[in-house]
Image (cartoon, rainbow, N blue to C red):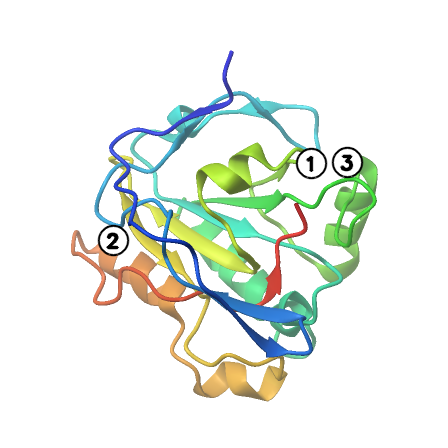
Amino acid sequence: MTKFTRRNIGLAAGMATAVALTAGSMIAFSANAAPVSGEAAPIFVDYPTTTGEEISLGDFDGKTVVLEWTNHDCPFVKKHYAEPVLNMQTMQSDASNDDIVWIQVISSAPGKQGYLEADAAIAKNAERGSEPSYTILDPDGDLGRAYAAKTTPHMYVIDGAGSLAYQGAIDSIRSAKVDDIAVATNYVTAALTAVAAGQTPEVTSSTPYGCSVKY
């Protein structure tokens, strides 16, 4: 069975534009070729997780879903997992308390930065106190490409009807500095708050920042 299908995805014309921001480690991308906010999110089917389960987007019909592309060696991912703020862990915990499904996705290819097999991914999350609902292993990059995931982190919020409510950066300040978290606008939290209220987020897409996904 095909692991994903593209349904009701509008594709913007032109080539994606990449802008190197720090020594090639952080790249900001245009939204070209990305799924369209407000339309159906790409369906994925039977993706393996670190616990040996296979999950599909349809398993969570009626629930809000967050997708988080991650690479534990990326400094911009480390920023959001770093002590003492523990920003990503707090967001995951808050989501769990609100019955939101949080899915971490590792799309790094074997031999590339961020690649982890199941046991190592479980250990890494335990080490940093991370508790996503699931961690999907996507070493062939099919799921990442279906969502046009460009950076780590790259975040997506899908509402209970399967529509893409938000996609893009985790917040408004493009840096690897932990101190910037407190003064940034957290786009993911804002989107989740809007979706819970039955509203469209004020910001439905933004340009992601971080390390390039290591396909």
Left or right for 95, reference 21 = left
Q: Earlier in the sequence, mark 2 or mark 3?
A: 3
Residue 131 drawn at (x, y percent): 62, 50
**Labels 1 and 3 touching (C-beta < 8 A):** no
Q: Earlier in the sequence, mark 2 or mark 1?
A: 1
The amino acid on which the numbered mark 3 sits, given as a three-letter code, is Ala
Residue 56 drawn at (x, y percent): 47, 25
Q: Which residue is mark 1?
A: 139
Distance Cα–Cα, label 2 vs label 1: 31 Å
Q: Is residue 167 above or below residue 44?
A: below
The amino acid on which the numbered mark 2 sits, given as a three-letter code, is Val
The amino acid on which the numbered mark 1 sits, given as a three-letter code, is Pro
- The answer to which image quadrant residue 48 occupies is top right
Left or right for 193, reference 120 = left
Q: Which mark is residue 25?
A: none
Image quarter hosting the C terminus: top right
Q: Choose between 44 and 131: the one closer to the eye.
A: 44
Q: Choose between 24 and 144: the one closer to the eye.
A: 24
Q: Secondary structure at mark 2?
A: helix
Q: Which residue is mark 3?
A: 118
Left or right for 19, reference 64 = right
Q: Which residue is mark 2?
A: 195
Distance Cα–Cα, label 1 vs label 3: 11 Å
